[in-house]
Amino acid sequence: MTPADQCFDGVVKGISDLGMSCFAYTRGRLPLLEALDLPMGYPSGMVATRVANDFVKKMNPKELDDVKVLYLHAHGPGLLHTQKPVHKIADIKGMKIRSTGLSAKIVENLGGISVAMPQGGTYEALQKGVVQGTLAPMETLKGWKQAQVIKYTTDCTNIGYTTAMFVVMNKKKWEALPKDVQKVFDDVSQEWIAVAGKAWDDADVEGYQFSAGLGNKVIKLSHAEEAKWEAAVKPVAENYIKNAESKGLPGKQAVAEVKALIKKHSKARK
């Protein structure tokens, strides 16, 4: 009914009864929720998905007041996939990396050159040498066949970002439903939190396997390098806090809450 970047407002206006898209597609429209996409070290899609849902329950962002939130979900950690090995942060300097939105800031803070493009254009850009790498979850290596045009994945899960996605309903449509039907929607939506989280994790596993089958290598950062990468991207969260607080939003609390929820759900997964 609407393009992806107009999906949320399309539901608000009643163009669509239901909508699913990414919060990141409308930067500035949902400012508090941008905390979910920061490079916080998400270990999996399941953790990211549970964090996103709990965050909304805890923070109750007013920016979602115009819709009925059914559930949220989020992909596994965004990692660095390249054509030449990246063992340390210095290896990224000057490298052109496909990235979009918030991930562009991550690339720039790591010393790379951000090249914005959608996933659909990434394969050809890597193939033609327009970019030398991409910042994305493992699932893109199979789902978008990008493993065919990269050789290495740098496991930088310690700064892994995610992209939170929404499934929402038009408020008037929701309020017009009988209570028993509303309960069915709520019950099924709660079940789908875990279903979506598992689906993202399964897709990441398939991405790893597909890439490995092509002979691609995974590089694990040393502890010293992990610390350097974390220090490099720290300003991304700090700038988020500064911008959110300037708008009267609890940016510092939002970041602290995301960190706490990642820790909580990571422990629950062990």
Image (cartoon, rainbow, N blue to C red):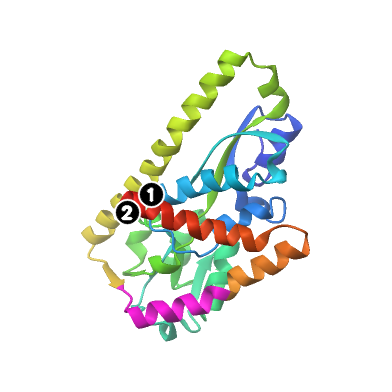
Secondary structure beneath dot 1 equals: helix
Camera-nearest residue between 69 and 14? 69
Evaluate whether residue 181 shows in this view.
Answer: yes
Q: Quadrant of residue 196?
A: top left
Q: Is residue 44 visible?
A: no
* Nearest to the observer: residue 240 or residue 147: 240
Q: Is residue 140 above or below residue 49?
A: below
Relative vertical location of residue 230 with respect to residue 17 in this rendering, above or below: below
Q: Position of residue 141 (x, y in %)?
A: 36, 57
Seen at 57% across and 68% down, the residue is 104
- Lateral position of residue 76 relative to residue 244, left or right: left
Q: Does the stretch in magenta take in 223? A: yes
Q: At numbered mark 2, what does the secondary structure look like: helix, strand or loop?
A: helix
Q: Residue at x 56, y 48 (%)?
A: 55
Q: Is residue 116 left or right of residue 142?
A: right
Cβ–Cβ below 8 Å for labels 2 and 1? Answer: yes
236 falls in the magenta region? no
Region in magenta: 220-234
Which amino acid, by three-letter code, is at mark 2? Answer: Gly
Q: Position of residue 269 (x, y in %)?
A: 33, 50
Q: Which residue is mark 2?
A: 207
Mark 2 nearby-residue class (10 Å; few <14, some 14–19, many ≥20): many
Asked which quadrant contains residue 115, the reply is bottom right
Res 143 label: 1
The span from disc 2 to disc 1 (Cα, nearest Å) is 7 Å
